[in-house]
Image: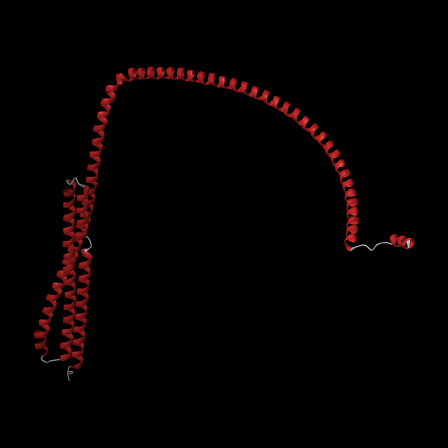
Amino acid sequence: MAANRGRVAQAPKPQSPSARLAQQAKLEYETLIGSYREANTALRQKLAETEEASAKNQAALEGRVQDLGQTLAQAQQSLAAMQTTITSDQAVMQQALTNQAENFRAAQENRGTEFTAWLKGQGQEFVELAHPHLEAIKAAEVDSAAVLQHIQALGDQTDVAAGQTTGHILAENFKTSAKEELQSGNHAFWTGIALSVAGVGWLVYVAIVAFWERGEFNWTWLSLKLALSLALGGVAAILIRRGQHAQATSRAYKRTELELRAIGPYLSDIEDRKVAEEAKVAFLQRTFGRAWEDHRGSTQAESLDGEHIKKALEAVSTLADKLPKAG
């Protein structure tokens, strides 16, 4: 019995699930702890290396910072020395500029005073030199003003004389043209009158004397004589018309001549040039251009007279053709 109990005691007891989980958790914990220790050891080693490198870099940086500090100190010392030098030079230059400006101002004042004194002396000297001639200069100025007025008056008189001379020349030309037109008109007019008288006399002779001498009545012969008489009368009418036109033109030329001779002295007394110009324009508008209108009217009248004579001759010729012929 005792032996069986011992066997029973030595036999393994079955594990519960919680015990198994606890054991498994323990194993995993130990495994994690081992891994953590390994990783921690590696990190510590790496951290030690990093600290060592940092210490070296810090030492190097401290050395460089120390060098830079020394360099900066030297630069500050150099800058301070340079500032001192610049300040000193600036003071020297400012003093030099001040002295130069004062010297220049003093020199300018001296030169201005000397120039003013010289100019005043020159003015007094010039006055003393010109004083003897001053009265002569004033008299010459008065004389020159009088001479200038005289020259201007002569210029105005010359303009008036030139205008009057031009008007006189134009008047002489119109006088010559009027004389020629009058002679031509008289010749044409009296020639036409003479032809009219001759035509009337010849017509009377043909109508009375020659008819009784022939003792017979010839219509063809009478028509021919009448046609010739009408042609002669037409020529006489044209000559008379031409003479009247020439006489009218001569009168217009004569009127223009008289106006040209009168307008010169009339305008010479007018001082207002605007009024004189308006009078000239009115004279030009009133005088020139009318002869051409009269000439065109006379030409049209002469053309009408010629057409009437031509028609009269044609009528007489037609009448002569239709009259009975002499046996």
* Residue at figure coordinates x 45%, y 18% from the top left: 101
Residue 114: x, y in percent? 38, 15
Q: With respect to residue 309, does 13 lie above or below?
A: above
Instruction: Identify which residue, 168 or 231, lies in the foreground.
Output: 168
Question: What residue occupies the far right of the structure in this picture?
Answer: 3
Instruction: Identify which residue, 131 or 12, lies in the foreground.
Output: 12
Residue 233: x, y in percent? 14, 68
Residue 36: x, y in percent? 77, 44
* Residue at figure coordinates x 76%, y 36% from the top left: 48
Number of marks in the rendered image? 0
Q: With respect to residue 245, does 271 lie above or below?
A: above
Q: With respect to residue 199, does 65 lie above or below?
A: above
Q: With respect to residue 289, does 146 lie above or below?
A: above
Where does the C terminus fall, quadrant-wise? bottom left
Question: What residue occupies the far front of the structure in this picture?
Answer: 1
Q: In the picture, residue 37 is in which quadrant?
A: top right
Where does the N terminus fall, quadrant-wise? bottom right
Q: In the picture, residue 50 is in which quadrant?
A: top right
Instruction: Identify which residue, 53 or 179, lies in the foreground.
Output: 53
Question: Relative to 47, is 209 on the left or the right?
Answer: left
Instruction: Identify which residue, 6 or 93, lies in the foreground.
Output: 6
Question: Relative to 102, is 160 on the left or the right?
Answer: left
Question: Relative to 67, is 179 on the left or the right?
Answer: left
Residue 221: x, y in percent? 15, 77
